[in-house]
Amino acid sequence: DDIYRLVRFLGFPVNKDAVSRIAAEVDASGTGSVSFQEFLKVVRFVRDHEFENIIRVFKRHCKDEAREKLHMDKFKIALSDMQYYVTDDVKTNILETMDDLHDDDHFIKEEVAEFLREYRRCNGFTEESAAEIKEGFDAQCRFVNEKRAFAIHQDAVQDGTEIGSPRSPKHQTPSAERRTSLMGRRTSQVNLLN
């Protein structure tokens, strides 16, 4: 399950059974766990499988004799055949960031592979959408930090260990010392459990 989640986190639309089978193949020690080097082999298998999917999609959707050029009109359908569901905005954004295409109306296999790498890199968001989401995430982090600092301050007031209170830091209880040290901490993570 962990390896499957990691591969999905990397952005590959993979089948859980296929990943389990690949992981079992690369588990040299037979322990049921995978080292980082073995995990890299899993990712390599997944990437190779993805390129095989690109070849299959080209065979299915290409009109040219050699099946080497995928027309732009078939691109979105081809992506969905590979289990990538890309919005038009994201597609346009990624195509604008890619270097000159071989042909304005067609893709070659390597360009599709490059597109998919870029899609995984941006997690399927346009730069504007990602910036907007990050702004909301950062605002939530600030709110959580302020809420945490306020709670620590309230606890300190109730305990009489508020910073600047008549009690000397050497008389602070361990929990008061911990709260004091936590006040300076900031987080860039949102706790989903609260």
Image (spheres, rainbow, N blue to C red):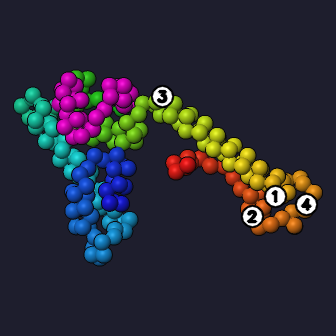
User: Amino acid under label 1?
Assistant: Asp
User: Of 145 and 147, which appears nearest the observer?
Assistant: 147
Rounded to the nearest angstrom, the CA distance separating label 4 from label 3 is 51 Å
Rounded to the nearest angstrom, the CA distance separating label 1 from label 4 is 10 Å
Disc 2 target residue: 175
Rounded to the nearest angstrom, the CA distance separating label 2 from label 3 is 44 Å
2 or 4: tag closer to the N-terminus: 4
What's the mark number on residue 167?
Answer: 4
- Marks 2 and 1: CB-CB under 8 Å? yes
Disc 3 target residue: 128
Mark 4 or 3, which is nearer the eye? 4
Asked whether the viewer can see residue 36, the reply is yes
Disc 1 target residue: 159
Q: Residue at x 78, y 61 (%)?
A: 176
Tell me where the magenta segment starts and ends, as one range: 70-97
For the residue labelled by badge 2, is the local secondary structure a helix, a strand or a loop?
Answer: helix
Residue 102 versus residue 150 in the image, above or below: above
For the residue labelled by badge 4, is the local secondary structure a helix, a strand or a loop?
Answer: loop
